[in-house]
């Protein structure tokens, strides 16, 4: 009797999130719906169901359950495994072709999914130059479909990230998107028309299908009975989905979402949790904490186009003064790891542990002495140096550049504390550490959009603290971040870094099909960046997530957390005692 009352109360709470009609339908189909519907908290409202417009994280999270790629990474070793594809692609080096075979699959409306849909997706991306995808499809000369289950990609040239970049794009149904593309071509701005076309009922092939979106309240996806992976063993895992639906509920703040998680109003909060919440969650009943490494980079960037940070010696002195261990242990509360290489250590395939670190193991005095010696040898001078005649540390003042001119005050731009307290506090600490050497540093929090404009568009800055929270597991971003050709307005080379040797290696790695040789090239690129320091890597934070344990089991951990395709295809209701 007590159990029945508890279930009735929980069902009543759950009904508040659904319109009456939908609640009645679900109750009729699933009497014990609390054991069938996985309730997921989101930090913000998804912005769109148009897969090509979806640039925000929450839209992509929802759409990742609807649209699927040809290949996914498996959780343990991060190797690619066939997903919508039936096997790994076959490469013909002489013909420069990749041949991909497809699994037998259907779209959620019952239409057969064929090679024509794959070819249509690629042609759409290339023709409309769809952002985030076009650069990864531009080198494809043509796409052939000899039969419904076979796709042959003809490359203009070898391209190392064909599998990791091109074949991980979402595949869309030609029968839904062809009319949209036809209408967009007739407008003056075809790309804008395509991106802004409202998609009210997306047709996909993923584990879930769209059913209802009540904006400001909830979004509901139902189990796709036509999902190609159901009852299939992929990478040794039997796939479902084993839940009847996903109910996404939007919470405006982490405080509200964490409270909802503690109360059991949601089963998962699909966002990283700040370490400050751990004490509250760790001692709450029926909660499990997951801690995974992220493929992330948080860094101090320098403007190498102008003084003072056009001087590599000064950048190295700054690197010596910055105490990354302090940032990780005090600011991140131990929930992360310091970085020396641009590629995070959790990406074991590409991370180079031999990249030079600066100041590691030094105490504050050793850092100041070492940085002072480095700058003094390069011709820097002080009115009052940081080291006196007896070799003791003292307050420094009025540093001069090697040409005798005063070093003018410079600014370290950071996001504001309410946007990211870790980056804001890191900027303040870096300011203090640099002042120990007499450097006239000033940390300045700035609205994130304004900060990006100054750094990426205007190039009007000295230094900045920014980060990439979810880097590709393929390190092709090294090319984007530091290739000299990307030093342009709104280009990825925000530091204005130029190095001919790096450029040569970047171009070579882009076209190197031998994995061993490409690994050697990527290792060299990391070493060069570690020596030249256009970016000083600071830290890679842990991704902390929490779920309820009394209703569902089966979450799959991997780099970048439990919110991955394997989890949503394997989570299942926990059997309750009768």
Image (spheres, grey):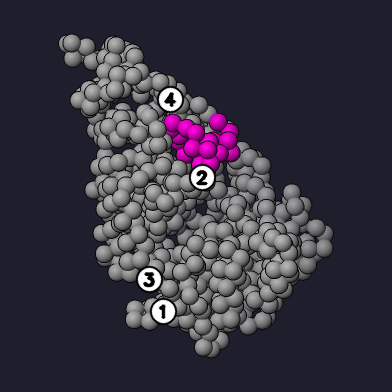
Between marks 3 and 4, how big is the CA–CA gap? 44 Å
Q: Which residue is mark 4?
A: 410
Earlier-in-chain disc, 3 versus 4? 3
Q: Give the mark nearest the N terminus, 2 or 1.
A: 1
Quickly name the residue at label 2.
Answer: 489
Q: Residues within 10 Å of mark 2 (few under 14, many from 20)?
A: some
Residue position for label 1: 97
Label 1, secondary structure: give it: strand
- Give the camera-side residue of 283 and 87: 87
Is residue 456 within the magenta segment? yes
Question: First in sequence: mark 2 or mark 3?
Answer: 3
Q: Evaluate if marks 4 and 1 touch, with contact meaning CB atoms under 8 Å apart.
A: no
Which residue has dot 3 on it?
158
Q: Is residue 364 magenta?
A: no
Rendered residue at 68%/63% (across/down): 190
Q: Residues within 10 Å of mark 4 (few under 14, many from 20)?
A: some
**Badge 1: how crowded within 10 Å, few (<14), some, or many (20+)?**
many
Up the image or down, 302 lies above or below 341; here it is above
Question: Could you say which quadrant of the image residue 465 lies in?
Answer: top left
Q: CA distance from mark 2 to mark 1?
A: 35 Å
């Amino acid at each position: 009797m007590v159990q029945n009352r508890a279930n009735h109360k929980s069902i009543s709470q759950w009904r508040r999130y659904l319109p009456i009609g939908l609640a009645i339908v679900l109750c009729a189909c699933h009497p014990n719906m609390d054991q069938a519907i996985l309730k997921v908290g989101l930090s913000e409202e998804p912005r769109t169901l148009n897969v090509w417009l979806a640039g925000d994280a929450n839209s992509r999270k929802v759409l990742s359950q609807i649209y699927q790629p040809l290949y996914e990474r498996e959780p343990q070793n991060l190797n690619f495994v066939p997903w919508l594809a039936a096997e790994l692609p076959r490469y013909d080096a002489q013909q420069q072709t990749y041949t991909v075979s497809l699994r037998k699959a259907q779209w959620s409306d019952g239409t057969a999914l064929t090679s024509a849909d794959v070819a249509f997706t690629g042609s759409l991306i290339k023709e409309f130059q769809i952002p985030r995808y076009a650069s990864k499809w531009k080198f494809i000369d043509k796409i052939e479909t000899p039969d419904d289950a076979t796709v042959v990609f003809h490359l203009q040239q070898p391209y190392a990230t064909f599998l990791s970049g091109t074949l991980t794009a979402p595949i869309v149904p030609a029968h839904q998107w062809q009319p949209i593309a036809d209408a967009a071509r007739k407008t003056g701005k075809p790309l804008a028309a395509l991106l802004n076309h409202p998609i009210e009922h997306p047709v996909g092939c993923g584990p879930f299908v769209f059913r209802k979106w009540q904006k400001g309240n909830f979004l509901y996806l139902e189990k796709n009975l036509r999902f190609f992976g159901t009852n299939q063993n992929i990478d040794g895992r039997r796939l479902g989905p084993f839940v009847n639906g996903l109910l996404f509920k939007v919470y405006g703040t982490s405080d509200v979402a964490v409270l909802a998680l503690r109360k059991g109003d949601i089963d998962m909060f699909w966002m990283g949790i700040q370490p400050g919440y751990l004490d509250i969650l760790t001692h709450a009943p029926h909660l499990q904490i997951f801690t995974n490494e992220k493929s992330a980079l948080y860094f101090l960037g320098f403007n190498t186009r102008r003084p003072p940070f056009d001087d590599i010696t000064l950048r190295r002195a700054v690197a010596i003064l910055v105490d990354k261990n302090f940032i990780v242990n005090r600011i991140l509360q131990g929930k992360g790891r310091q970085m020396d290489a641009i590629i995070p250590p959790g990406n074991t395939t590409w991370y180079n542990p031999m990249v030079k670190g600066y100041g590691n193991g030094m105490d504050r005095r050793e850092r100041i002495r070492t940085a002072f010696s480095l700058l003094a040898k390069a011709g820097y001078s002080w009115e009052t140096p940081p080291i006196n005649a007896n070799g003791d540390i003292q307050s420094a003042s009025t540093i001069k550049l090697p040409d005798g001119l005063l070093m003018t005050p410079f600014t370290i731009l950071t996001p504001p504390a309410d946007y990211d307290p870790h980056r804001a506090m890191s900027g303040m600490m870096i300011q203090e550490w640099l002042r120990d050497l007499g450097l006239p540093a000033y940390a300045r929090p700035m609205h994130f959009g304004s900060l990006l404009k100054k750094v990426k568009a205007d190039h009007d800055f000295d230094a900045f603290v920014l980060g990439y929270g979810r880097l590709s597991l393929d390190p092709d971003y090294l090319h984007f971040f530091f290739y000299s050709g990307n030093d342009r307005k709104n280009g990825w080379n925000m530091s204005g870094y130029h190095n001919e040797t790096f450029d040569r290696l970047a171009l070579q790695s882009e076209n190197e099909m031998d994995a061993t040789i490409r690994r050697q090239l990527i290792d060299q690129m990391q070493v060069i960046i570690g020596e030249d320091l256009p970016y000083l890597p600071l830290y890679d934070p842990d991704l902390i997530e929490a779920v309820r344990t009394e209703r569902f089991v089966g979450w799959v951990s991997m780099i970048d957390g439990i919110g991955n395709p394997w989890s949503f295809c394997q989570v299942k209701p926990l059997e309750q005692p009768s």
